[in-house]
């Protein structure tokens, strides 16, 4: 089953070695087992965990390459990590080269993340609290599906060092979320002008 991840990653030019694949296999089995009891993620089928969780988390590797953001040697936080995505796949991929922290508000998920760390024999910190309460600062903050874009931007920026990068992974809903705040107006002599209007309350 985990060979599928190797194959798909390879096709995206992400190369996984035996040790990384072994860890992904342990992750897959541990998540599937605990998910039955703790309802950690709505994605239950192993094939879908491989694509929608593992492969999708690893897309950050290519984003880093594309943008020139260097994760090596950096303090990275995953805001709203849930069952570990994308933070744990990043830790499996980069190993000791990165210092990963997972921020997750729900206790049962934190318990899972602590247990998973032992199963995988890797190091990361779990901040079992809301991101709004975290006092530490990070070089890079990544976040997938943790909430509405404006909230995630606010929470993420607060825990970012100056010059750091905040990366929010969003799906189709991003346009829907921004739409209520956008206004388009026509002006003579100009193409359509779009505004995003946000009131601080
Ligand atoms: C939909 S899940 C996504 C989990 C994971 N990032 C993924 O993509 O599979 C959102 C997670 O973010 C957590 N969360 C939402 N807002 C948060 C906040 N302000 N601080 C910490 N965790 C938060 C929730 O408890 C939940 O586990």
Image (spheres, rainbow, N blue to C red):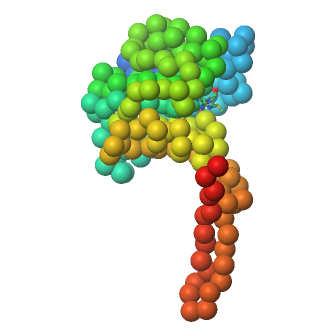
Q: Position of residue 163 (x, y in %)?
A: 32, 46
Compared across the picture, whether 76 is left or right of 116 comes to left
Residue at left offset 30%, top offset 21%? 96
Identity of the residue furthest to the bottom in this view: 189
Q: Is residue 190 left or right of residue 95?
A: right
Q: Nearer the viewer, residue 77 or 134?
A: 134
Which quarter of the rendered picture does the N terminus lie within? Answer: top right
Quadrant in which residue 49 is drawn:
top right
146 vs 89, left or right, is: right
Q: Is residue 133 above or below residue 200?
A: above
Q: Residue drawn at (54%, 43%), measured in percent from left and top?
A: 154
**Quadrant of the image where one finds ligand 1:** top right
Q: Work out whether 23 lies above or below 119.
A: below
For this rendering, which residue is in front, 50 or 141? 141
Identify which residue is drawn at 27% across, 30% down: 73
Residue shown at the point (72%, 18%) measured from the top left: 39
Is residue 93 among what the camera can see?
no
Residue 14: x and y in percent read 40, 38
């Amino acid at each position: 089953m985990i060979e599928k991840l190797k194959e798909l990653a390879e096709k995206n030019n992400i190369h996984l070695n035996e040790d990384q694949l072994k860890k992904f296999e342990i992750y897959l089995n541990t998540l599937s087992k605990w998910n039955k009891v703790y309802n950690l993620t709505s994605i239950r089928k192993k094939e879908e965990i491989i694509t929608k969780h593992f492969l999708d988390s690893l897309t950050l590797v290519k984003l880093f390459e594309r943008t020139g953001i260097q994760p090596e040697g950096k303090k990275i936080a995953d805001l709203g990590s849930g069952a570990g995505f994308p933070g744990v796949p990043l830790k499996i991929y980069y190993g000791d080269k990165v210092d990963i922290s997972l921020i997750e508000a729900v206790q049962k998920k934190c318990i899972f993340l602590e247990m998973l760390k032992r199963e995988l024999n890797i190091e990361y910190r779990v901040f079992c609290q809301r991101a709004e309460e975290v006092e530490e600062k990070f070089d890079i903050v990544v976040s997938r599906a943790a909430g509405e874009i404006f909230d995630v931007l606010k929470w993420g920026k607060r825990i970012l060092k100056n010059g750091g990068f905040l990366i929010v992974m969003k799906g189709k809903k991003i346009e829907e979320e921004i739409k209520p705040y956008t206004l388009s107006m026509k002006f003579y002599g100009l193409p359509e002008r779009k505004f995003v209007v946000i009131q601080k309350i």
